[in-house]
Image (cartoon, rainbow, N blue to C red):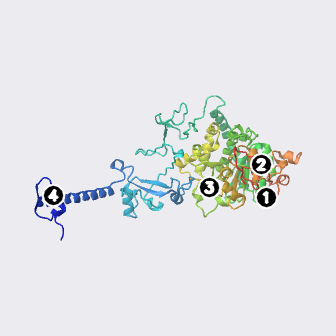
């Protein structure tokens, strides 16, 4: 038979009264039964309380009422999917398994929450104990009439925080760090947070600073002098250029622009010779030489030229011995003008440095009507560097395509106006990247930087850092358009690297020589149709030689010395 309440409590036979051992007191079973019922009620009440608590948690908003004008819900989207869906333009490393796999989307208004599913909307707004919902990009943004995109990272796993403040809208990020900006110290945890430049590095170096204006030789005064020359001669320069561009520009209204001085002329000759040997038409190439010697070399190779003697004549003709030296900075000014002029006249521009070789015609890529590149005003090769100096784009200023429109014209006009910063910061690239960020935000300039790991437009980053890619490149197993020998200190090393890579086409008798030296006497012809230098200067096959065993080479160079400390053989 079922056990009675009394037996459950005392283990007895269920009689209504019994003695408890030791004290002789009689237990009232009816009273005990009442206590047991009360105990069960308490258990049920506790279970109900717990259920109600769980339900309460399910209905708890992710953000409190104090943030209702800033945050009304949250969702996650795979970073790679979000970038594929919108093509944000910024270069992105793949997110999978990196700790940066997801992007966070904050819904500022309840109306911006997804409406295609009430379950999804509820999960984004309320804490349902299963974490922040993961949505596809289309569903997550279906009711976002506006989307603010913030790119952020935490290099070095620093103790970094991000504050989002409900306030008058700002499209700039203030950066605060525990540093002494007067002494340019690295981060010190004992110091208070202080407003710094966005280019202040954690090690204590400020990459962005105002140019000094005192003294006649200050960057500002030198910049003003150059601008006076520019404005005084602008109309005549554009008048001279117009018929040249009409003749040179392709049917797509595009011209390939290079600038060079005598110090870098061997690289210009190599570009022309390698392109000719591969059968490329160089009729849409226009060279802006900064001296007469380079003008004659370019024309002797059949290239069209325009020598802006008033603005570029005073520039030095020697080669840059290192990044940022006097000759390097002078040629940066030429890189500004030679792009600005064609844009002002309405021509699209593919600008490239002379340390580039073509493997396929890059115009095919930029003019591909099946791609979505037409939405961008400027398209850059990735530099490879993740330095704060080049954030947020890391755009390489030695290879890029520009569509002529009012946004791009003003971008390069602004770059001209900021040439004093180029002098101060020793970098054309650094200034241009910051203007890209500002003009994208201010004017809606469409900026696209190709991914660092793309095989189509490799450069010095790949040559020095990605041996796996370089082995495929040497075997011609890649879909590469151009190779850019960037990330290399000077012209001499570029030449040696190109030789052992099997991409050097200039005969020794033409390296560093003028057209007069090569042809003798008055054998220089000043017509873009002339090709007098092609036969003596352009080798039919690439000229190969070994120099450094720790750098990529077409053939093994195991017996050559390394160039880097403890450099391991490429082969």
Q: Residues within 10 Å of mark 3 (few under 14, many from 20)?
A: some
Badge 3 or badge 4: first in the primary sequence: 4
Residue farthest along the bottom direction in this orientation: 1
Q: Which element carries disc 1, helix, strand or loop?
A: helix
Q: Report x, y in % for residue 333.
A: 67, 41
> Is residue 522 shown left or right of residue 247?
right
Residue farthest along the top direction in this orientation: 215
Q: Residues within 10 Å of mark 4 (few under 14, many from 20)?
A: few
Q: Which element carries disc 4, helix, strand or loop?
A: helix
Q: Nearer the viewer, residue 399 or 528?
A: 399
Q: Quadrant of residue 388?
A: top right
Q: CA distance from mark 3 to mark 4?
A: 74 Å
Disc 2: which residue:
560
Residue farthest along the front direction in this orientation: 22
Q: Are marks 3 and 4 in contact (CB under 8 Å)?
A: no
The label number, if any, that marks residue 35 in the structure image: 4
Q: CA distance from mark 1 to mark 2?
A: 29 Å
């Amino acid at each position: 038979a079922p056990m009675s309440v009394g037996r459950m409590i005392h283990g007895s036979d269920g009689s209504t009264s019994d003695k408890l051992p030791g004290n002789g007191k009689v237990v009232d079973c009816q009273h005990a039964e009442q206590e047991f019922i009360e105990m069960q009620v308490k258990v049920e009440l506790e279970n109900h309380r717990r259920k109600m608590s769980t339900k309460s948690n399910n209905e708890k908003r992710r953000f409190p009422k104090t943030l209702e004008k800033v945050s009304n819900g949250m969702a996650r989207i795979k970073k790679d999917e979000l970038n594929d869906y919108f093509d944000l333009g910024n270069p992105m490393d793949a997110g999978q398994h990196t700790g940066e796999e997801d992007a966070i989307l904050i819904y500022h208004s309840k109306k911006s929450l997804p409406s295609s599913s009430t379950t999804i909307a509820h999960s984004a707004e309320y804490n349902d104990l299963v974490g922040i919902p993961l949505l596809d990009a289309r569903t997550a943004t279906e009711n976002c009439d506006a989307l603010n995109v913030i790119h952020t990272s935490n290099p070095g796993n620093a103790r970094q925080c991000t504050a989002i403040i409900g306030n008058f809208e700002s499209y700039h990020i203030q950066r605060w760090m525990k540093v002494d900006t007067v002494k340019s110290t690295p981060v010190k945890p004992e110091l208070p947070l202080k407003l710094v430049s966005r280019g202040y590095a954690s090690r204590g170096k400020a990459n962005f600073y105002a140019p000094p204006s005192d003294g006649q030789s200050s960057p500002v005064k030198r910049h003003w002098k150059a601008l006076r020359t520019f404005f005084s001669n602008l109309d005549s320069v554009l008048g001279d250029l117009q018929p040249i561009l009409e003749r040179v520009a392709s049917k797509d209204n595009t011209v390939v622009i290079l600038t060079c001085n005598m110090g870098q002329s061997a690289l210009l000759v190599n570009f022309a010779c390698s392109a000719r040997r591969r059968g490329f038409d160089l009729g849409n190439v226009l060279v802006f030489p900064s001296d007469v010697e380079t003008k004659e070399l370019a024309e002797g190779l059949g290239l069209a030229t325009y020598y802006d003697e008033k603005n570029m004549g005073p520039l030095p003709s020697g080669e840059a011995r290192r990044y940022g030296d006097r000759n390097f900075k002078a040629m940066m000014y030429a890189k500004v003008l030679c792009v600005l002029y064609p844009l002002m006249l309405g021509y699209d521009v593919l600008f490239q440095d002379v340390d580039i070789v073509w493997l396929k015609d890059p115009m095919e890529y930029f003019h591909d009507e099946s791609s979505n590149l037409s939405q961008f005003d400027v398209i850059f090769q990735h530099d490879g560097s993740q330095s704060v100096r080049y954030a947020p784009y890391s755009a390489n200023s030695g290879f890029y395509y520009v569509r002529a429109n009012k946004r791009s014209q003003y971008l390069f006009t602004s770059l001209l106006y900021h040439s004093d910063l180029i002098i101060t910061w020793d970098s054309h690239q650094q200034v241009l990247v910051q203007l890209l960020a500002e003009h994208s935000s201010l004017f809606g300039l469409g900026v696209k930087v190709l991914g660092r790991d793309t095989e189509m437009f490799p450069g010095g980053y790949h040559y020095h850092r990605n041996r796996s890619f370089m082995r495929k490149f040497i075997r011609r197993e890649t879909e590469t358009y151009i190779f850019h020998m960037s990330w290399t200190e000077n012209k001499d090393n570029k030449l040696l690297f190109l030789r052992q890579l099997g991409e050097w086409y200039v005969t020794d008798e033409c390296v560093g020589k003028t057209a007069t030296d090569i042809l003798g006497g008055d054998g220089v012809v000043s017509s873009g149709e002339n090709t007098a230098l092609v036969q003596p200067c352009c080798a039919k096959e690439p000229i190969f030689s070994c120099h450094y065993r720790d750098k990529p080479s077409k053939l093994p160079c195991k017996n050559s010395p390394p160039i880097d400390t403890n450099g391991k053989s490429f082969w």
